[in-house]
Amino acid sequence: MTAVELPPGRPLQRLPVRRIRVRVRQILCLVPLLLVTVVAVRHRSVLAEGFGHLRHAEWPWLVAAAGATCLTWVAASFTRQGAVVQRLPGRRLLATQFAAGAANHLLPTGLGASAVNLRFMTVCGVPLARSSAALALYLLAESVGRLALLAALFVAFPDALRLGALLPDAAVGPLLLGLGAVVVVAVGVLAGVRRVRTAVGSFLRTALCEARSVHSRPSRALALWGGALAFPALQAAGLAAVGQALGLSVPPVHMALAYLAATCAVALVPTPGGVGSVEAALVVALVAAGGPAAVATAVVLAYRIITVWVPLVPGALTLGALVRLKVI
């Protein structure tokens, strides 16, 4: 038997992993813009009507609303920094909040902003467990701040809203039944699944430790709770400014109360950025505060144009740039 030599084959080449990663990152940069385009096309009638109302508004009040909207990103930055002990880079943190706002309007129930901020803290060197604890602390502080403002305004202005219009009697039963079912399922899962119980217990221990560390530093605690109160207050101030611009016959404080009540009511509605649900709840709340339905609808559409749709494209561009620069 004679051995036959095969021609030397070409050496195996390593896959260009770095080049693939670059291509994937470039594609991810375009995803936010594509999602913005899809959302804008689906809501083009709302956009057209909202921009139509803006043409007849008093521009100084609209500028004030835009300024309040910009300050919400600053307040969110303070709250995010206050929720973690480690110092975060200020400029990148502010840019991340602007980009997170766009992501939040493209994914349901705040998942977009949470994912962006979780990734940002991880890139900044915060361990994943502490990043998750800081995220939970931020959400808790923001919820407490919103509810505290709502309660304070209710105490100060008890007749500002007709609660029957916001929550009909027929809706109370199903709402309580749904909440009870969620609680029962959660308790059942915790009691019956050991891995879930262990994971939840570990997370709670980490979160409590992180909360103690944050509150042991006065500057962090002030940033956390000051930002948590300022964020919903600035959002409500923006709605009140738009109401003044369009001549809504409701006192500004009552409009702020209506905003807080409406956003608390739709907090559990799983729609991207509350698109659709927030508009409906705000209109109902402003009507319950004593405003005409037509003007209230115009105010809500104009407000959502300023706070959601105008920042959406630059926010998506910022998100893509942060992905490209490996900030997130």
Image (spheres, rainbow, N blue to C red):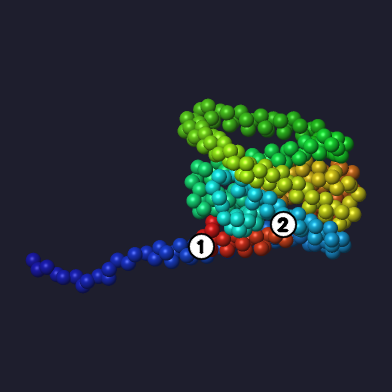
152 or 6: which is nearer to us? 152
Extreme-bottom residue of the structure: 7
Q: Position of residue 250 (x, y in %)?
A: 89, 47
> In the rendered structure, which amino acid carries the disc numbered 2?
Cys
Look at the image and tell me in which quarter the C terminus lies: bottom right
Q: How many marks?
A: 2
Q: Position of residue 55 (x, y in %)?
A: 84, 64
Q: In the rendered image, which quarter is residue 303 located in?
A: bottom right
137 or 84: which is nearer to us? 84
- Disc 1 marks which residue? 25
Q: Nearer the viewer, mark 1 or mark 2?
A: 2
* x 60%, y 55%: residue: 90
> In the rendered structure, which amino acid carries the disc numbered 1?
Arg
Sooner in the amino-acid sequence: mark 1 or mark 2 = 1
220 or 307: which is nearer to us? 220
- Disc 2 marks which residue? 70
Q: Is residue 84 above or below residue 244?
A: above
Q: Is residue 189 above or below residue 264?
A: above
Q: Residues within 10 Å of mark 1 (few under 14, many from 20)?
A: some
Instruction: Answer with left or right where residue 101 lies relative to residue 187.
Output: right
Element type at mark 2? helix
Extreme-left residue of the structure: 1
* x 68%, y 59%: residue: 312
Q: Determine whether label 1 and label 2 are within 8 Å by CB.
A: no
Q: Position of residue 37 (x, y in %)?
A: 66, 62
Q: Does the image show residue 96?
A: no
Instruction: Answer with left or right where residue 80 lies relative to residue 290.
Output: left
Q: Does the image show residue 172?
A: yes
